[in-house]
Image (spheres, rainbow, N blue to C red):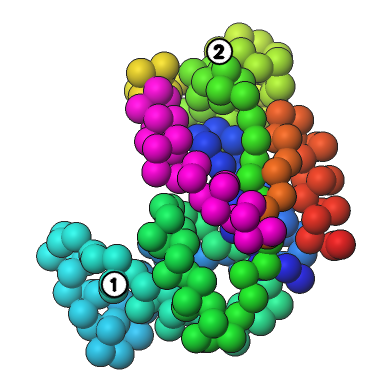
Amino acid sequence: MKNIIFIAPPAAGKGTMSELLIEKYGYIHISTGDILRGIAKSGTELGNKIAALLEGGKLISDEIVYDAVRERLRMPDLDNGYILDGFPRNLNQAEEYDKILKEVNRNLGVVIYLDTPKDILEKRITGRRLCENCGATYNVLTGVNTPHVEGKCDKCGGNLYQRSDDNSESFAVRYQEFIEKTYPLVEYYKKNNVLVSIDSVDPDLTIKAIEGVIND
């Protein structure tokens, strides 16, 4: 299977798509946080250094992140395909990741940009409601997964609530950060002929398009 990097603005559905691919195809999902925590438990020199930084609540430099990613990619459980989450986040990290892939003899695979209009993303964020009992997720603005009874969970009847950060102001900050720091990766990978842009408005059509890419 092709390795995957998702580039996606907030609420574009990256988490949902990753879960579907993991369940159906057995992809290994790795994030920089997972990598750092896993290596911190390894007892290696790098692991002990990361563990000390995590325990002390100190900032982990890009160089240590690169070392951790390099070590993780050498592990054989990734040989059948992996989804890399949260890395690279900017052009410097993308260029370093290319070097790491050559060192560990792995293919980059495919970079998938989940393209979604900003207004839809905002509705996904501001219209999101969670069940206080079972954690089920709904949306009251998009017309997708709307609760049958206003304010009540379809599954358990629990009360629905809105997270404090699911608001327009928070979304605007997160979206602008994505545009400034991460969106330039779209052009970077497009120039390298590894980028596929997929419309992610309709989740069912999105996953079908992704499957078409990874099975090509």
Is disc 2 placed on a helix, strand or loop? loop
Q: Give the x, y percent position of residue 210.
A: 77, 50
Which of the 4 image quarters holds residue 127?
A: top right
Give me the C-alpha separation between circle 2 and circle 1.
Answer: 47 Å
Q: Give the x, y percent position of residue 59.
A: 19, 60
Q: How many C-alpha atoms fall within 10 Å of the one at disc 1: few (<14), some, or many (≥20)?
A: few
Q: Give the x, y percent position of residue 5.
A: 59, 58
Q: Give the x, y percent position of residue 129.
A: 52, 22
Question: Are the residues at dot 2 and dot 1 in contact (C-beta closer than 8 Å)?
Answer: no
Q: Nearer the viewer, residue 166 or 173?
A: 173
Q: Which residue is under mark 1?
A: 63
Q: Is residue 139 above or below residue 33?
A: above
Is disc 1 placed on a helix, strand or loop? helix
Residue 174 on the magenta segment? yes
Q: Residue furthest front?
A: 191
Q: Nearer the viewer, residue 80 or 176?
A: 176
Q: Which residue is under mark 2?
A: 151
Q: Residue at 25% across / 75% down in the picture?
A: 50
Q: Residue at 52% across / 65% down in the picture?
A: 30
Judge whether residue 97 can be spotted in this image: yes
Numbered mark located on residue 121 in the image: none
Q: Residue at 29% across / 66% down in the picture?
A: 62
For the N terminus, which image quadrant?
bottom right
Q: Residue at 85% across / 62% down in the picture?
A: 215
Q: Which residues are magenta?
A: 171-193
Tell me which amino acid carries mark 1.
Glu
